[in-house]
Amino acid sequence: MEFRRLNILDLKSLLELYRQLDKNDEQSLFEQSERVWREIEDDPNIQYFGAIENGKVVSTCYAVYIPNLTRGNRGICFIENVVTDKQYRNCGLASKVIDMAVSFAKDRHCYKVILQSGAARTEAHRFYEHVGFDGASKKAFDMRLE
């Protein structure tokens, strides 16, 4: 098993794994996703991390560093799209991938890391609390834009 930052060569496998994240998510054409990936690669504040087995991304998350004018100008890191392939769950892969994202945040001297999870995903919530996130410290709100 290899743990590393993802690159363009991982994109097809990453998109396949994302199908397990949300069955209702509309998949874009590969060419469109490839253009978005190029934008991501050009931005050092966005990093995708993964566990790769035989060239296949089996666990992943991404982290976004956001500069901040409070807390002594220490930034915030936002972690999103945490997913592990069904066949590889409960093996510690997501913990290691999240650790990579947290290290990314620490390297940028962030004062906190934010991770959101669907309100009904109680099993995932227990996992996030197990790896150090506090599910009771804040209340998150989102606004879906059509």
Image: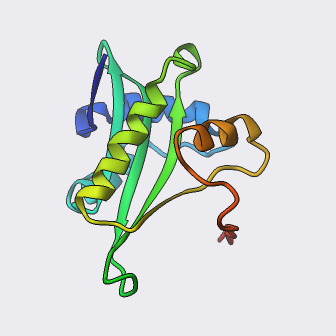
- Quarter occupied by residue 135: bottom right
In the picture, measured across the screen, residue 12 lies left or right of residue 79, that is: left
The percent position of residue 85, horizontal first and vertical second, equals 53, 23
Q: Is residue 106 above or below residue 50?
A: below
Q: Is residue 116 above or below residue 14?
A: below
Viewer-closest of 97 and 103: 103
The percent position of residue 28, horizontal first and vertical second, equals 49, 46
Q: Is residue 35 visible?
A: no
Q: Is residue 102 visible?
A: yes
Residue drawn at 66 percent across, 67 percent down: 138
- Quarter occupied by residue 13: top left
In the picture, measured across the screen, residue 23 lies left or right of residue 64, that is: right
Residue drawn at 46 percent across, 53 percent down: 79
Viewer-closest of 64 and 90: 90
Residue at the limit of the structure toward the right, as seen here: 120
- Quarter occupied by residue 107: bottom left
The quadrant of the image that shows the N terminus is top left
